[in-house]
Image (cartoon, grey):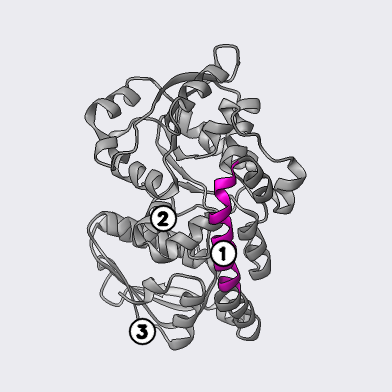
């Protein structure tokens, strides 16, 4: 199921939910109570950079039920571009918020991490806490995805009665493992939270809150885990390149070529081949406050489980919310074996998609 009513925005090529920390925690509590799965992703700068060159990694975020901006560089970009993702909501922050504030009991299962780390995390939670209980742990070693997805491992997780599965395999591998096993897992909340197992076990301490708020947590993490220096250094260089080649040009384009109010007012969609077809013609400019018909239409297109076409010939503008929803539809159709095509894109809109980091939408 895809929720097209999410307050989701495209940020550096990824769908990001504009939610606060309490709102994110409430969404996970709802999943735990209803036992309806919530695949949580927590994109940071490394996620965004990796997704530009690895479509499978990007797909894992697009298939998530909740996607949080876990990194101050993403917040800085959002502020510059006027995208309403206003605060960093880290995966470890959500976990700690639930640990302290959740009104209900959480059973936690740890999968991965260094040898013995999952056991240490379970012991640290223990049976003393009122909000969290250890449901179990597995150290799967360093095999490939198939080896880590053996039936006995999945059965062990499913038989534990866990409410949350915390995966720690490295971001790319962890996201791939989750996608590979998503349908076979019955845990309501599933997320790759690589640092959480270390924080809970007490082997790595979290940065002071002022460092988290100011974007300096990476310095603390390097102090705690020096092996992260190379990754942060490479990410920093790539971030500067993204600022120069995508973010600043997009900020300029949005200011000098912004749609007029009348263009937003005449936004509409139609079905030139009939209501039962997969072809939709859009017109005018689309932004967060006029997307209600688009949300309904995307639900209809996904329910058809067939190829869909968006005719963009008369579209004069689209914001991060429209593009974020389109990312969700594109990936959901792909999961069904269908394809979404955007046709008749004028060069200006093609450039807009490119600067948003989703040029693949214009290439189909």
In the displayed structure, would residue 82 be above or below residue 162? Answer: below
Residue drawn at x 34%, y 57% as measured from the top left: 56
Question: Looking at the rendering, which quadrant does residue 52 occupy?
Answer: bottom left
In the displayed structure, would residue 344 be above or below residue 341? Answer: below
Where is residue 235 shown, x and y percent of the image?
A: 55, 61
Where is residue 215 shown, x and y percent of the image?
A: 70, 53
Nearest-to-viewer mark from 3 and 2: 2
Where is residue 171 shown, x and y percent of the image?
A: 44, 47
| Left or right: 93 in relation to 49 | right
Residue highlighted by disc 3: 344
Residue extending farthest to the right is: 210
| Mark 1, secondary structure of its residue | helix
Assign the C terminus to one quadrant of the image.
bottom left
Where is residue 284 shown, x and y percent of the image?
A: 50, 79
Asked if the stretch drawn in magenta spans residue 95, the answer is no
Residue drawn at x 52%, y 31% as measured from the top left: 197
Residue highlighted by disc 1: 288
Residue highlighted by disc 2: 62
């Amino acid at each position: 199921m895809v929720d097209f009513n999410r307050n989701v925005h495209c940020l550096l090529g990824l769908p990001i939910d504009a939610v606060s920390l309490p709102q994110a925690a409430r969404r996970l509590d709802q999943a735990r109570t209803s036992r309806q799965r919530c695949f949580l992703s927590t994109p940071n700068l490394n996620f965004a950079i990796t997704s530009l060159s690895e479509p499978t990694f990007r797909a894992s975020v697009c298939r998530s039920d909740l996607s949080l901006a876990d990194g101050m560089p993403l917040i800085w970009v959002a502020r510059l571009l006027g995208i309403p993702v206003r605060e960093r909501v880290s995966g470890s922050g959500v976990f700690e918020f639930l640990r302290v504030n959740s009104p209900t009991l959480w059973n936690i299962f740890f999968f991965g991490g260094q040898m013995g780390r999952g056991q240490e995390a379970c012991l640290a939670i223990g049976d003393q806490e009122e909000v969290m209980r250890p449901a179990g742990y597995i150290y799967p070693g360093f095999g490939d995805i198939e080896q880590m997805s053996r039936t006995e491992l999945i059965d062990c997780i499913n038989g534990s009665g866990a409410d949350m599965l915390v995966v720690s395999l490295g971001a790319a591998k962890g996201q791939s493992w989750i996608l590979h096993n998503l349908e076979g897992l019955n845990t309501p909340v599933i997320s790759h939270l690589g640092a959480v197992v270390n924080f809970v076990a007490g082997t790595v301490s979290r940065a002071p809150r002022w460092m988290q708020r100011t974007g300096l947590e990476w310095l603390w993490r390097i102090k705690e885990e020096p092996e992260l220096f190379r990754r942060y250094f490479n990410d920093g260089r790539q971030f500067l390149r993204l600022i120069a080649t995508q973010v600043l040009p997009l900020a300029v384009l949005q200011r000098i070529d912004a749609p007029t109010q009348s263009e937003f007012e005449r936004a509409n969609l139609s079905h030139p081949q009939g209501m039962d077809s997969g072809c939709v013609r859009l017109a005018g400019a689309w932004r967060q406050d006029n997307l209600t018909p688009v949300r309904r239409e995307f639900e209809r297109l996904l329910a058809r489980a067939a190829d869909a076409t968006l005719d963009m010939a008369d579209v004069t503008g689209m914001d991060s919310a429209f593009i974020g929803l389109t990312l969700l539809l594109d990936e959901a159709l792909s999961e069904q074996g269908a394809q979404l095509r955007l046709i008749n894109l004028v060069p200006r809109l093609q450039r807009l998609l490119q600067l948003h980091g989703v040029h693949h939408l214009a290439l189909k």
